[in-house]
Amino acid sequence: MSTLADLTTLRVGGPAGRLVVAHDSDELLAAVQDVDARGDRLLLVAGGSNLVVSDAGFDGTVVHVAVPPGGGVAVGDADACAGADVRVQAGADWDDLVALAVANGWAGLEALSGIPGSVGATPVQNVGAYGAEVADTLATVQVWDRVEHRTRTLASRDLQFGYRDSVLKRAAHAGPDGMDRYVVLRVTFQLPLGDVSAPVRYAELARRLGVAVGERAPLADVREAVLALRAGKGMVLAAEDHDTWSVGSFFTNPVVAEASLGDGLADAPRWPAGDGLVKLPAAWLIEHAGIGKGFGSPGPAAVSGKHTLALTNRGGARAEDVVVLARRVRDAVRERFGLTLEAEPRLVGLSL
């Protein structure tokens, strides 16, 4: 029997009641329609890099969204004014798309190098890193609406993107079975043409590149620098490295009213988040709450030895081990700073 541990980067999770593999977007749509016709529950799994499923597993149908033959990328019109119109099937590998963009001189995705998972998952939580977000270049998303039983094309503005948020994410429990309402089939990006990157917005990346924040750098240099930074934090998948057996950042950076920050947070780094709000780095909060790299070791689940935002499977961990560790980290931050960290990955059959 297939288990969710076999399909997720954290390598935890119990059995799937039923497993169906969709090899392209057409098969994905057919599989979802069949599940709904059966009156079954649906769980979509692609790269499995943002998913934590309980040890009991999932008692419905798991549709595994596989990488399409040929990669699933098609390019429409491309000119200096409009840029490249890049249409991508949901199951396409995200980092393969970024590599292809850099090789072809399509700018805008380079700072998102090395992020595991599928293209179809990226708009759901508006994936971002090193000052860039999917929302920066996304044009449209084609979805199957499981409530209205029709295909819809949603423009970027319709998706109401926020920090690790979108309409798609907010509808994660609005489907007919209490699961996802929208199934992403295809994503279209509008990418400027050129050999230099979008403005570098993240100070750590700018330092690595030797440029000022706001300046540009060659696409290939940005990709190389991001991959090196991510690898140093255990954020590039490697089967032999247990620090990468994770879902990446387990907690989102909290956004709070700056006026509400007490003395304990006077020295905390922060970024403006609009309307008197600031974003605080969860990693800083965790470390200053007494949770260091490797916390929990030598247990089956531990904080990464390279980055305090990653909770890792040291081999043989169960989902419950990971959740217990996550609660300890969350509670330490709450007791020290009065802030409650929120989980970034999707939890299925689990709660903090």
Image (cartoon, grey):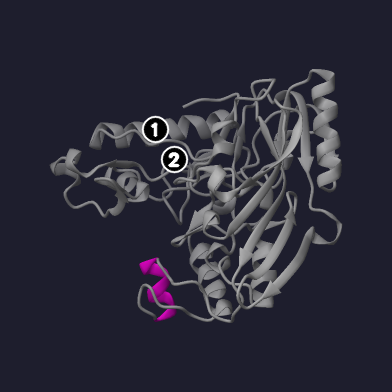
**x, y percent for residue 246:** 57, 46
Q: Is residue 164 above or below residue 150?
A: below
Residue 200 or residue 228, whichever sits in front: 200
**Nearer the observer, 233 or 262:** 262
Q: Is residue 125 visible?
A: no
Secondary structure beneath disc 1? Answer: helix
Separation of disc 1 and disc 2 at Cα? 10 Å
The front one of 329 and 208 is 208
Residue 332 placed where, x, y %?
Answer: 32, 35
Density class for disc 2 (Cα within 10 Å; few <14, some 14-19, many ≥20) is some
Task: Give whichever of discs 1 and 2 has the lower sequence position.
Answer: 2
Q: Residue 58: say if magenta.
A: no
Q: Label 2 belongs to which residue?
A: 296
Q: What range of the chain is rendered magenta?
A: 202-210
Per the rendering, the mark at residue 328 is 1
Disc 1 to disc 2: CB gap under 8 Å: yes
